Amino acid sequence: MDTHDISAPPRAQSRHTADKRPNQRHARSGHSGVGLTHDNARHTARFTVIGNHLAQHPELSALAIGLGVHIQSLPAGARVDIKTLAARFPEGTTRIAAALRELETHGYLRRERHRIPDGRIVTRTISCNQPGSSRRDPHTAPKATKAARAAKPAPRKALPPVPRPAYPAPALIQQATDLLTGLRRHDPRLLLSACDTAHLAPGVAAWLERDVTPTAVRHALTADLPPEGLRRPAAFLAHRLSAQLPPPPPFRAPVPPPAVRHPLQNCDRCDHAFRSPEPGHCRDCRTDFPEAA
């Protein structure tokens, strides 16, 4: 993770000869003493400059602001994955994962996937102390323009295709949707949006259609997840649904229904027993009748 340890002394303030605390902020004139009063002392070591755009962000939750301040204060190379932060703070993994997504949405965090020399792919987390700006060489990089700041973000990459069931019955699609919605209870990183769930549901339905139990499908999607995190959980699940699709079950010929056994009846003419749904004459006696002949 890249963090910026900006250690800059505050602006010089005018001192009054009778003021023993030159850095104390008093209430403005005209106030009756109601409200906030700062009792500040100048930091000379172990401090981080935090922008008010983060500390007073109008849309971020208190947990997201606190995690953002904590992450910006950490040195480069510190671990900021969900499990590490959950071990540091009393909030659970679900709330911390949601707060990290808030910071990522508003540009205070970026996650980039890199391939390391041994071939593994790891996720690198980058902390941005001022979203919208980047670290550039002032001598070589051109100055930012208003048009560049107002540029629209790149469109989101489409999710990989998933298998399709042969008979997408509504009940089967609903069962697949319920299974995907419940994945976040097994791992908070698998929290899916409604759009992602609708895209993945046919793939899960294709598995269920092949006589795979919901428990087996859930295990196939949640087992052995990458420890470094998931940048796009929906894309990861779409790949597993396609790559690990089991073969269709073997064809089984339908079993014919058992033959109907009628109850025994006594012939009204010869009193012999025969099977028939109704009383009457046996087959031999029926052939003796003139009308039968």
Image (tube, helix red, strand yellow):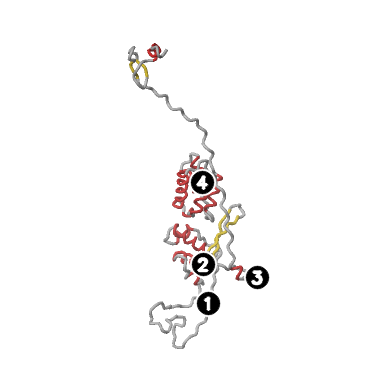
According to the picture, the residue beneath numbered tag 4 turns out to be 202
Report if the CB atoms under discs 2 and 1 are less than 8 Å apart.
Answer: no
* Front tag of 1 and 3: 3
Name the residue at 37% across, 20% down. Answer: 276
- In this view, the residue farthest toward the front is 291
Name the residue at 54% across, 51% down. Answer: 236
SS at badge 2: helix
* Front tag of 4 and 3: 4
According to the picture, the residue beneath numbered tag 1 turns out to be 9
SS at badge 3: loop
On the question of residue 123 being in view, the answer is: yes
Report if the CB atoms under discs 2 and 4 are less than 8 Å apart.
Answer: no
Report if the CB atoms under discs 3 and 2 are less than 8 Å apart.
Answer: no
According to the picture, the residue beneath numbered tag 2 turns out to be 72
- Disc 2 marks a residue whose amino acid type is Gln
Q: CA–CA distance between discs 3 and 2?
A: 27 Å
- Disc 4 marks a residue whose amino acid type is Pro
- Disc 1 marks a residue whose amino acid type is Pro
On the question of residue 46 being in view, the answer is: no
Q: CA–CA distance between discs 2 and 1?
A: 18 Å
The residue carrying pointer 1 sits among few (fewer than 14), some (14 to 19) or many (20 or more) residues within 10 Å by Cα, namely few
According to the picture, the residue beneath numbered tag 3 turns out to be 142
Pick the residue in front: 167 or 144.
167
